[in-house]
Image (cartoon, rainbow, N blue to C red):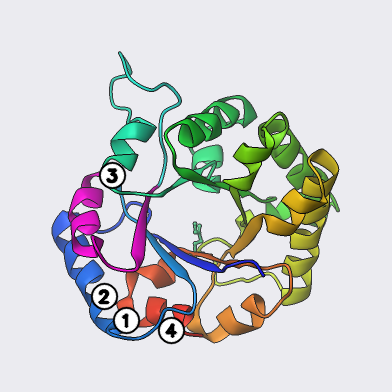
Amino acid sequence: MRKRIIAGNWKMNMDHIEGSSLASLILEGIGEKELPCEVVVIPPFTTLPAVAEVFAGSKVDTGAQDLWYEDAGAFTGEISGSMISRLGCRYVLVGHSERRHILGEGSGILALKLRAALRAGLTPIYCVGEAAEERESGNAEDVVEKQVREVLEGLGPEEISRTVVAYEPVWAIGTGKTATPEDASGMHSFIRGLIAGIFDKEAAGRILILYGGSVKPGNASELLGCGDIDGALVGGASLDAGQFLGIIFS
Ligand code: 13P
């Protein structure tokens, strides 16, 4: 049985003051309740230390939204994997669609970033997903296959066992349009099949594949009820403690 992860990607929202308040509200909402899944909060870099402090010693994990692919050195403006892990973070996003599309990150740099995350002892959450035109033209699976192969091929068995994939169709991000549970779970099983082909059945059975794109309390349980969907990467709804808790306990 695979575990489930609900991760909240705060994107470029919540400064360190707003972020610690939101983190405290999330903790209060959880209270003494048993968490039905692993919960990860992924704030901006400057908010991360404050949020990591609020969650220290709690059941909630933290993650970063990006990292650089070298471990240290003359890379002005960049943040290394070890800087992130020393804050107590366990996760880091790699290849979020906003970085692919707005900042032009492609497979070459993402493969390096994913390996840097693993080197630093972090769990990379590798994001893949097709744009609207690619789905409309029937190319969604080809696009996702390329994203998976170009970045994950060549990882060792131990490395793939520490990697999480998030399927986030670009057209569903921040739009209120969600993939139907059938479309989402179809793509998730396609990705699992790719992992079986590139690695083996054991790696495919073990890898967690999260869904992202307009996940809300109202649609979470239907999406999470699909066999191949192992959790959610939540954007907008993770900025509201009530909505985020609604998804966690859905
Ligand atoms: P929304 O939940 O706002 O659609 O964002 C999804 C996302 O990009 C999470 O990484």
- Counting residues from the N terminus, which is met first, the one under dot 4 or under dot 2? 2
Classify mark 2 as within 8 Å of ligand 1 or not, answering yes or no.
Answer: no
Q: Earlier in the sequence, mark 4 or mark 1?
A: 1
The residue lying furthest to the top in this view is 74
Q: Say whether residue 38 is magenta.
A: no
Check residue 46 for magenta coloring: yes
Q: Residues within 10 Å of mark 4 (few under 14, many from 20)?
A: some
Tag 1: residue type? Answer: Ile
Is 198 located above or below residue 201 in the figure? above
Looking at the image, is mark 2 or mark 3 earlier in the sequence?
2
Label 4 vs label 2: CA separation? 13 Å
Residue 210: quarter of image:
bottom right
SS state under label 1:
helix
Q: Residues within 10 Å of mark 3 (few under 14, many from 20)?
A: some
Residue under the point 65% across and 42% down: 160
Q: Is residue 79 left or right of residue 111?
A: left
Q: Residues within 10 Å of mark 2 (few under 14, many from 20)?
A: some
Residue at the disc numbered 1 = 30
Percent x, y of residue 83: 29, 34
Position above or below: 148 against 243? above
* Quadrant of the rendered image containing residue 9: bottom left
Q: What's drawn in magenta, residue-wise?
A: 45-64
Q: Earlier in the sequence, mark 1 or mark 3?
A: 1
Q: Which residue is mark 4?
A: 246
* CA distance separating discs 2 and 3: 20 Å
Q: CA distance from mark 2 to mark 1?
A: 5 Å
Name the residue type under label 4: Gly
